[in-house]
Amino acid sequence: MAPLRAGRWLVALPMAALAAATVYPLVFTANVAMKTRHEYVLDRFSPAEALRWDAFATAWGSADMGRYLANSLIVVAGSVALLLLFGSMAGFALSQLRFRGSRVLFLGCLAALFIPFQVIMVPLARTMGQAGLVDTYPGLILAYTAQFLPFTVFLMTSYYSGIPGEITDAARIDGNSTYGVYARIMLPLGRPALLSVGILDALFCWNDVLIALLLMPSPEHRTLMTGVTALRGQYSADIPTFAGGVLIAAVPVLLLYLFFQRQIASGVTAGSTKG
Amino acid sequence: MPIGTPPTSVRPAAAGPAGETARAAAPRTVRGPRRGNLRFPRAERLAPYVLVAPAVLVIAGLRLYPLALGVNFSFTGDGDRNGQNVGWDNYRTLFGDPLFAEAMRNTGLLVLLLPVAVAIPGLLATFIYLRVPGHRLYRSVYFFPAVLSPVIIGAIFNLLLAYDGPANALLGAVGLGPVDWLGDPDVAIYAVVGVHVWATFGMALVVFLAGFATLDTSLIDAARVDGASLPLVIRHVIVPGLARTIQFVVVTTMIGMLTSMFGLLYVMTGGGPEGSTYLPEYYIWFQQGQMSRPALASAASTVLFVVMLAVGLAQLAILRRSGRED
């Protein structure tokens, strides 16, 4: 189709400015993290005199970011593994198998998609407390799994609906049980969707702070994001170290974005074009 | 069923292993679906239920059940009256609490700002779709804050919006006085919402672009050949063509505004100054954790849920009606 001709640049300029405004906050923060405290107090805008990594080292060491990172990795890995397993099993069954009650179960999952965590957090915290799961890894992993499972089931179901039923029939005829069809055919076929949903789920779990604050209150169990919220109090007078800590927490996500931008975008848009 | 009808079968029945499979399978398919069920071992018949069981149990136990539990819980007392039925007392307390009133006022403000939060990414997506110079770059750049945690974004904007930070330096350069972005009760909520929009418009933008990909380009070309201006094309070709996408973005943006600003509030303002940036979700958190009033918090949760249902249904109704007019 014909691109805009007149006024193309008139539009492009504000858009370029907006792009700059999107990137600038991160650049500013990185620059601050490279400065010494003295430099920062004198002039916070000028480029840092040298590439200094002290702030990152201090944040990593004395603010315990290493431990928070490990906590986050454990919880995110556990949650994503459970989400993909449960999500693909349910998605396969709901889209490819005909059984009584499948429609009701699918609608139930869909309804759960519209229950925000804030609405159930009080009773959930109480139930978790009674079960002795507060401040434990399994507790937080279970909470994340419950939180993002409706979304995962929904996406996996819609992905598997696109796979012709003849494939399941053919695999059955070749002597596979239903479980065999799932493990040997559907899991490998679902790889693109599993990757896309898995990355999104990992982002959701990684970025969450409310659920982690509620269910992992003790300092040694802090996830990285909870750790970042605590940084401000710890380093209110040492802004470069604060900035360094914030960036450490941002880097894994930025890397994920660089490598998997397309998968992230396709996961985000999956619900908008189907259903 | 190709296997049951050998003459038209794609594979010659005699040839190699494929033929063996077809022969072995033939009796099974001939029997028909009804009797097939009886032939299946019990394990096979239960398989679908076994496959959905983990997901269903987790969702039912940790999402649907707590919802019912919470509604129930909101009619019991806190502290001394723990577990007793107190009727509508919590709701009375709630609607008498100026802090909750502030939270609801701010919710109303968010609903009013919703069109802006949808129009900005919509317009930007239109320009990217029309290939302004640099459109490829904009798409990736605009989207990236959407993947960052609200906590990180809030922390970064704490630096940017500091009284002597870059935002005020920029204002100073054009001769405007410094603004106490996060300290002025009249300004703070707009600052936080602004940061939220900055952080999430890329999400809606990507959804819009996916919608554009399904749009019939010949319609736009035809309109432009006929001399229609860009605003006219947007009004009469793009908006009707994207009705489904717009509906999706409106609903997800609304849910995002009502339920994913906790991280920003927690890091940037803590609900202050003077409670001016309270939202229902922050109020729930505050009553549950800080004030140890879980039953009151449950009442607030129930109100939030009802508000979300009402807003969602109202939006759907409005969108459906405006869709019919076109």
Image (spheres, coloured by chain):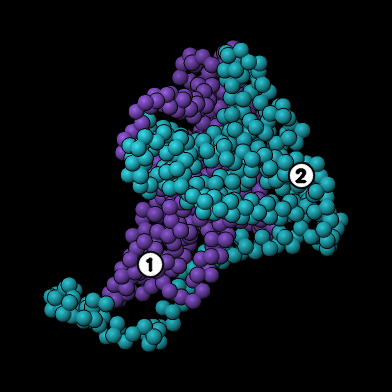
Chain colours: A purple, B cyan
Q: What residue lies at 43% left-to-right and 48% top-to-bottom?
A: B241
Residue sticking out furthest to the right: B80
In the depicted structure, whether residue A266 falls above or below residue A229: below
* Dots 1 and 2 on the same chain: no
Q: Hey, what amino acid is under mark 1?
A: Tyr
Q: Hey, what amino acid is under mark 2?
A: Phe
Read off the residue under disc 1. Answer: A182
Neighbours of disc 1 within 10 Å: few (<14), some (14-19), many (20+): many
> Which secondary structure, mark 1?
helix
Read off the residue under disc 2. Answer: B100
Q: Are marks 1 and 2 in contact (CB under 8 Å)?
A: no
Nearest to the observer: residue B63 or residue A52:
B63
In the rendered structure, the answer to whether residue A211 lies left or right of residue B141 reads right
| Chain at tag 1 | A
Residue A21 in the image: state x and y as whole percent: 50, 26
Instruction: Please tell me whether mark 1 or mark 2 is closer to you in this view.
Output: 2
